[in-house]
Image (cartoon, rainbow, N blue to C red):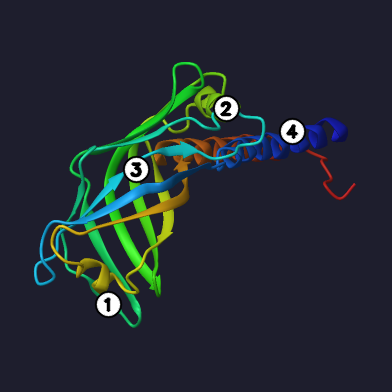
Amino acid sequence: MKHSKWTMLHGLVAAGALLLGAQAAHADQIPFSGGSSGLSMFQAGTPLSPDLQFTFNGLTVGPIAGDTLTGANVTITPTTTFDLVGPITINGSIQSANFNPGGGTISIGNATTGTFSGNIDFLGIINPASGFYNVTMALSNITVTAGTSALLTSWAASSPFAGGAGTMTFSFSSGPATLTDLMGISNGSTVTDSLQGTVTPVPEPASLALLGTGLLALAFVFKRRLQGAPGLDLQS
């Protein structure tokens, strides 16, 4: 009797670990990079009234060991630009600014490898050090379909990201030392540079809530069974 209850306890722990492990497995990232013209920044305004615009070109998925997704195109729209919508914020030596995605979307892969797609809801740029820039895009409504990519297939199998969220982060360095200098390039000027980064989806809140509820329910059932089983000695 005691053995069966310990077996049930071990089963509960193992089930919880498997559920949590299944979620953790989806923390894998899709690396990507762009060539020398992977990122173009065009000054459509003036130094006194800057309107720096982003355009992305030639992005491809970076090496994922043994995965067919490697080399797949990363497409970001709008194909024109992302426009500056706010002033530069300065916090000590760190500068930042936000951009309007204009209903942007991201898509990766194809019908063979599988696909990853989502909406771009936000784009922000930070200048943490001289001449170096970090950019983050907030993604939503992520949809993943299976294909020959093991990574995408594993995501699609449990569908934790259907309608979920994620981030696309990348970095680049350019001539101007500060974001102020970058915004201050003359009207009509273009800065191009290579970039590299990752796309990271995260489970939708509903999936996490369902996981937590399931674990709590299992714990409750186990507790009730223990209370109804006289003579159980967990120290034995």
In this view of the protein, which residue sits in the foreground, 129 or 155?
129
Q: Secondary structure at mark 2?
A: helix
Q: Residue at x 42, y 59 (%)?
A: 172
**Left or right for 26, reference 78:** right
The residue singled out by tag 4 in the image is: 11
Q: Nearer the viewer, mark 1 or mark 4?
A: 1
Q: Residue at x 22, y 70 (%)?
A: 88
Residue kind at label 3, given as amino acid type: Leu
Q: Residue at x 52, y 29 (%)?
A: 155
The residue singled out by tag 1 in the image is: 90
Pointer 3 or 4: first along the chain: 4
The residue singled out by tag 3 in the image is: 139
The residue singled out by tag 2 in the image is: 154
* Furthest residue toward right: 236
| Res 201 quadrant in image | top left
Pointer 4 or 2: first along the chain: 4
**Left or right for 50, reference 200:** left
Pointer 1 or 2: first along the chain: 1
Which x, y percent locates residue 157?
54, 23
Q: CA distance from mark 1 to mark 2?
A: 42 Å
* Neighbours of disc 3 within 10 Å: few (<14), some (14-19), many (20+): many
Q: CA distance from mark 4 to mark 2?
A: 24 Å
Q: Residue at x 40, y 41 (%)?
A: 205
Quadrant of image for the N terminus:
top right
Q: Nearer the viewer, mark 3 or mark 4?
A: 3
